[in-house]
Image (cartoon, rainbow, N blue to C red):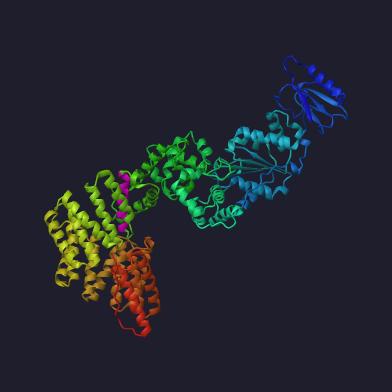
């Protein structure tokens, strides 16, 4: 080994003589050869620039090969001691070949899958005949380092030397290169760090066949000089930065694990310590963690130590997110947790405060398909730049029109922690309120019943749903309450269930405005309407009865809001089958609306249409026809022939013709109405689906069952596309389709369809619901027909779809 004594002021060469004497006394004396600094012109290529001026003693046998000192090559003779004056002594790095045992590869943790990424990395490395530089990039915690370590371990035998460097700072990179020098020439360990780093770089530059892994590099700038100097060997870089590598390195992107691999990773870690662990809920847990390897490993280690199930862990994560994001098993690295893994990235983004603010905002919405238009700002350029930086560090995935954020990045970003500068409670609360006001502004002033406005509502809907799921009603702002009310009305118009939205809107309106404010009363009316549309008529009647009394007291009997409640209460009684009560209330509503609003007001026309139906239900066909035809004429005159209300009147009149036995007239009117609905509202509009169902029923009545079945199936497919499989109208369509198969003589198919519909109706509506009983009666009747071999009629009939 190299033994040296640095000169200190006032010491001089006497210290070397003393050392030599001490060596002689100890029986270790060797001949001393003095070397002096040659002229600068005699320096050789491997001279270390700016070396400290020191003197060193080099013992024979302590180094193999030549020694460079101050630019002069020295051969150490046997049994001699060389005292080097000036620059320290170093071996000639070009002539050194390390042994395989000198390599350093971190052990890979449990490794699953990643075959595509490994193949891509191998292909990129093999594409170049000279130095191959590859940047493996991805979100923090996604498994970049594990992938690189796996690659190095699998292919260690094809490299003469493999070295792993933690390169998360310039100092760490220099230390790693210095360790390369020490690995290939252990005698250089005592040299200053800067000199060892230079020697390590020179060794890499003068050899090939090696693999150098630079783990967690900040970006391409930190490695540009090294890549420019070292033109041989293979360098694999891992980095969170996904951009800027052009001209420096090829890239390999790493994403989260496939769901099955994530679940297997969790199972293996847990069962390594707890072989008979109950892993029920593992699929849901991995999904909640976004299949991020680091998060799955952290959760698995915690499960194994605490011996709890994934389901319990999920519950804890929901109740105590801040604590669970930092919870680790004993012996785990507290700095590599879900709560801390992105600190480094956010620190690097500190020069762009808007990036952190946008991340907080994005954290409240759904993780996928966030429209970039939601982030419109007066400083458009600043928003684009901030999004670009977040995407560069893989914190988001940026598309031309949408943004995707990993669900765990969202969860951590919206979980306050007073000790974390990136997650201050006030900042997160501000972002939450901005998330609701931003969504509300996207649909404010639009009409939830107008198909042209529906794309705007649909774009907002999943993000409002996510925001609602992630916040408590107690923190809803007035904007949030308004947003939920508007979306609830949109969902009803689309034939979907919206009770949850309206119930939450009522809570917010009451908290902000009080129980008797008109907006609170309107929200309560909308909630009752949502219950009616969802088939919960009894609940709607209770709510509307109480609401009517409150409206009478707070608004007065002639207020338009009060009259709306009377009309809706009458409609709820009609749906419940209490036609007498419905008739009385509709009469009151019609008389008051004609007096207060006028005979031609759209609300008056709506009540008149309802009166026509109840006249029809009680058997007063003549009055029903007069009112229905008059209402249609008024709507065509006032609203236009293509208005949804006009189309509804036309559908109702056709249905009345069918009930009166005027089948041909009904068919003609339904066919025309269907064409108008498809033209003006669209083929998959709920109104269009209703008319298609009614036309199918009319064909069935006319005996053209073969024409009815495709229409029933099309109407059912329309409702399925709307995403409301549990809506009562869907159950009604399924009942009607089963009845058509019965009329066609396919009793087995009819029974199968009736059984499925009855099971779902019982689950959704309850065994005592009117629709459930109709379906059950039809099922029982068809079973009797099949048992008797008869084909007689006697079905309870179809179900009205509205």
* Vertical arrangement, residue 72 with respect to residue 318, above or below: above
Q: Nearer the viewer, residue 323 or 502?
A: 323
Quarter of image, res 271: bottom right
Q: Nearer the viewer, residue 1 or 759?
A: 759
Q: Nearer the viewer, residue 157 or 70?
A: 157
- Labels in figure, total: 0
* Vertical arrangement, residue 496 with respect to residue 10, above or below: below
Horizontally, residue 265 falls left or right of residue 537, namely: right
Q: Provide the residue span drawn in magenta.
A: 478-493
Q: Is residue 119 magenta?
A: no
Image x and y of residue 596, in percent:
13, 54
Image x and y of residue 488, in percent:
31, 54
Quadrant of the drawing holding the N terminus:
top right
Q: Nearer the viewer, residue 348 or 371?
A: 348
Res 744 visible: no
Image x and y of residue 169, in percent:
60, 34
Quadrant of the drawing holding the C terminus:
bottom left
Q: Is residue 490 magenta?
A: yes
Image x and y of residue 691, in percent:
29, 67
Residue farthest along the left direction in this orientation: 595
Res 627 visible: yes
* Vertical arrangement, residue 47 with respect to residue 212, above or below: above
Magenta residues: mostly which secondary structure?
helix
Residue farthest along the top direction in this orientation: 10
């Amino acid at each position: 080994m190299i033994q040296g004594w640095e000169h200190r002021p006032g010491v001089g060469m006497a210290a070397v003589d003393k050392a030599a004497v001490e060596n002689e006394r100890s029986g270790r004396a060797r001949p001393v050869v003095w070397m002096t600094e040659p002229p600068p012109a005699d320096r050789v290529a491997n001279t270390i620039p700016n070396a400290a001026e020191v003197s060193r003693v080099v013992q024979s046998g302590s180094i193999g090969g030549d020694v460079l000192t101050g630019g002069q090559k020295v051969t150490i003779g046997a049994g001699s001691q060389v005292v080097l004056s000036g620059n320290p002594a170093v071996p000639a790095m070009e002539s050194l070949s390390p042994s395989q045992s000198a390599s350093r590869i971190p052990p890979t943790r449990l490794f699953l899958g990643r075959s595509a990424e490994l193949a891509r990395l191998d292909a990129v490395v093999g594409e170049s005949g000279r130095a191959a530089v590859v940047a493996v990039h991805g979100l923090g915690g996604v498994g970049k380092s594990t992938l690189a370590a796996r690659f190095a371990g699998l292919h260690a035998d094809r490299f003469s030397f493999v070295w792993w460097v933690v390169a998360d700072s310039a100092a760490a990179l220099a230390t790693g290169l210095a360790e390369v020098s020490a690995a290939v020439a252990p005698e250089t360990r005592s040299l200053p760090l800067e000199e060892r780093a230079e020697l390590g770089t020179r060794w890499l530059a003068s050899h090939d066949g090696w693999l150098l892994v630079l783990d967690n590099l900040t970006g391409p700038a930190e490695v540009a000089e090294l890549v420019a100097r070292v033109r041989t060997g293979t360098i694999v870089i891992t980095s969170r930065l996904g951009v800027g590598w052009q001209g420096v390195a090829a890239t390999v992107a790493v994403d989260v694990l496939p769901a099955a691999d994530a679940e297997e990773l969790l199972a293996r870690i847990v069962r390594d310590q707890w072989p008979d662990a109950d892993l029920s809920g593992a699929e849901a847990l991995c999904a909640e963690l976004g299949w991020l390897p680091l998060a799955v490993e952290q959760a698995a280690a915690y499960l194994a130590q605490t011996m709890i199930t994934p389901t319990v862990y999920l519950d804890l994560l929901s109740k105590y997110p801040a604590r669970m994001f930092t919870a680790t098993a004993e012996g785990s690295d507290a700095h590599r947790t879900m709560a801390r893994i992105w600190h480094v990235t956010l620190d690097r983004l500190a020069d762009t405060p808007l990036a952190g603010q946008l991340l907080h905002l994005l954290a409240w919405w759904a993780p996928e398909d966030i429209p970039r238009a939601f982030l419109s700002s007066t400083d458009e350029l600043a928003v684009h730049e901030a999004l670009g930086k977040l995407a560069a560090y893989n914190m988001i995935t940026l598309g031309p029109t949408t943004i995707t954020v990993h669900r765990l990045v969202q969860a951590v970003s919206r979980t306050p922690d007073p000790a974390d500068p990136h997650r201050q409670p006030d900042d997160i609360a501000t972002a939450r309120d901005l998330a609701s006001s931003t969504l509300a502004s996207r649909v404010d002033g639009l009409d939830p019943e107008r198909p042209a406005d529906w794309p705007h509502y649909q774009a907002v809907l999943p993000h409002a749903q996510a925001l609602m799921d992630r916040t408590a009603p107690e923190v809803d702002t007035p904007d949030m309450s308004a947003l939920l009310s508007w979306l609830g009305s949109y969902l009803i118009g689309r034939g979907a269930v919206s009770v949850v939205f309206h119930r939450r809107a009522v809570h917010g309106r009451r908290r902000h405005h009080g129980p008797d404010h008109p907006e609170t009363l309107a929200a309560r009316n909308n909630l009752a309407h949502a219950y009616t549309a969802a088939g919960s008529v009894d609940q709607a009647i209770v709510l509307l009865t109480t609401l009517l009394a409150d409206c009478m007291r707070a608004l007065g009997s002639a207020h338009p809001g009060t009259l709306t409640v009377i009309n809706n209460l009458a409609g709820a009684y009609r749906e419940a089958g209490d036609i007498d009560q419905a008739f009385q209330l509709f009469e009151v509503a019609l008389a008051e609306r004609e007096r207060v609003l006028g005979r031609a007001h759209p609300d008056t026309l709506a009540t008149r249409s309802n009166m026509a139906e109840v006249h029809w239900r009680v058997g007063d066909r003549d009055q029903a026809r007069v009112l229905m035809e008059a209402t249609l004429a008024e709507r065509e005159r006032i609203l236009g022939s293509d208005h949804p209300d006009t189309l509804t009147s036309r559908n109702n009149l056709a249905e009345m013709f069918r009930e009166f036995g005027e089948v041909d007239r009904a068919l003609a009117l339904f066919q025309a109405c269907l064409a108008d609905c498809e033209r003006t509202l669209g083929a998959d509009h709920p109104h269009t689906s209703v008319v298609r169902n009614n036309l199918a029923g009319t064909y069935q009545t006319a005996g053209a069952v073969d024409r009815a079945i495709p229409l029933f199936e099309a109407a059912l497919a329309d409702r399925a596309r709307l995403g409301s499989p549990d809506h009562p109208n869907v159950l009604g369509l399924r009942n009607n389709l089963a009845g058509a198969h019965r009329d066609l003589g396919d009793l087995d198919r009819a029974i199968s369809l009736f059984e499925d519909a009855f099971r779902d109706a019982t689950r959704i509506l309850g065994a005592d619901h009117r629709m459930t009983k109709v379906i059950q009666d039809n099922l029982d009747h068809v079973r009797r027909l099949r048992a008797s071999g008869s084909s007689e009629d006697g079905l309870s009939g179809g179900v009205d779809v509205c």
